[in-house]
Image (cartoon, rainbow, N blue to C red):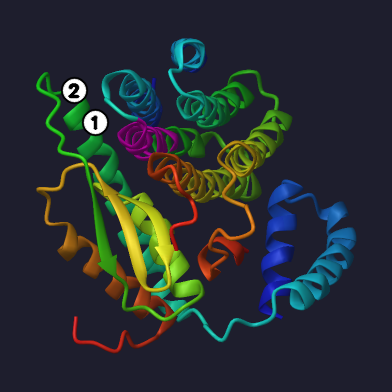
Amino acid sequence: MLRFLAVLLVWWILTDGEASALAFGVGVAVLVMLVSAVLFPRSGYRLVWYRVPGFLWFFVVQSAVAGLDVARRLLAPSLPIAPGLRALTVHLPEGAPRWLLANVLSLLPGTLSVRLQDNQLLMHCLDTGMPLEAQVRQAERRVAALFGVDTGVAL
Amino acid sequence: MTLLELAQAVLLLAGCFFYAIGTLGLFRFPDTLTRIHALTKVDNLGLGLIVLGLLPFAAHLAAAAKLLLIWLLALAASATAAHLVALAVRQQQEGNPHDD
Amino acid sequence: MSLVLALVAIFLLLTLMAGLWRIWHGPKDVDRMLAAQLFGTTGVALLLVLAEAMATPALRDVALVLAVLAIVATVAFVTRVAQIDRPSADRKEGADDTP
């Protein structure tokens, strides 16, 4: 049902809110919902819906900080970067939470997910002198809260 | 020019500024992986500012929602693309993709 | 206001031109791919601005399609040139269950 509403919302957006297209959209939404239910069965993780706005806000603010951070480094004549690779252990469960963390980290300040293999995350860092571990753990906590899962360790 | 229009103009120009920096990053940064940082993060900020600047122009709610949808899509796309390209670079650097 | 929009559009076009330099010089294919990705993100912004400046809402749909195509281009590049998809490469949960 949630999927149906989400698909219908996207249809409504794509058709610029055209009322005459909506009847057709309901039919399309039902078909898309059925196909997606077959292709992508429930992963077992559910978003904690009331935490979604907070997560989005965290993400938008942090990605803006990331943009400013890179811009600042680029504009400085000395080009203050110290790139390097770092490997970290991820405490999130497999599947959607881990995947979301890796993707979100790519847009957060200084980090870029290179490879996610089991619970080992290889990251490329723009400045290895930054407090990267703390940042990753913070993002991890946010993702864990979003999915309402326990990371299994005290963070 | 009203205050809102002024704010929009500032947002749009700021967006341009960050796009220019993102492109500058393609030239100034020394290697491919650092260039990915510049491209994804700074350009996303640029797109975000431009979308924000264009939002008040939207004739109705659905048009505004479409702008936001495009922005979200671009965010997801650039995060995924950045990850894939970084992985490709890493595998080429290792010269041996069968390392697991 | 339309003047601002026109200036923004022209400026974005100029940054695209700068990206062409990177495509021309490389040095590696990956760098060229990055410039192509730049075309994707800048192109989306350019089309959104033009949609407003020329009062052509359909250009927004073009921007949407461009955003989707940009990721398809990157995936095609990575799988073909860098060959992530070779059989023994790790087919783990992260890369495959993208919704």
Q: Chain of mark 1?
A: A
* Residue type indicated by callout 2: Leu
Q: Which residues are magenta?
A: B32-47
**Residue position for label 1:** A71
Task: Report how far apart the C-alphas of labels 1 and 2 lie in the structure.
Answer: 6 Å
* Foreground pick, A132 / A86: A86
Q: Which is the main secondary structure of the residues drawn in magenta? A: helix
Which residue appears at 75% of the width and 56% of the height? A11
**Membership of C93 in magenta stretch:** no
Quadrant where the N terminus of chain A sits is bottom right
Which residue appears at 43% of the width and 80% of the height? A147
Is residue A56 found left or right of A68 in the rendered image? right
* Foreground pick, A42 / A4: A42
Secondary structure under the numbered disc 2 in the rendered image: helix
Is residue B90 found left or right of A20 in the rendered image? left
Q: Is residue A67 above or below residue A104?
A: above
**Membership of B40 in magenta stretch:** yes
Could you say which disc has been placed on residue A137 in the image?
none
Picture coordinates of residue C90 (x, y %)? 53, 63
Picture coordinates of residue B46 (x, y %)? 39, 32
Quadrant where the C terminus of chain A sits is bottom left
Q: Are marks 1 and 2 in contact (CB under 8 Å)?
A: yes
* Residue type indicated by callout 1: Ala
Q: Chain of mark 2?
A: A
Q: Is residue A138 above or below residue C47?
A: below
Could you say which disc has been placed on residue A75 in the image?
2
Crowd rating for badge 1 (residues with CA inside 10 Å; few <14, some 14–19, many 20+): many
Picture coordinates of residue A16 (x, y %)? 72, 46
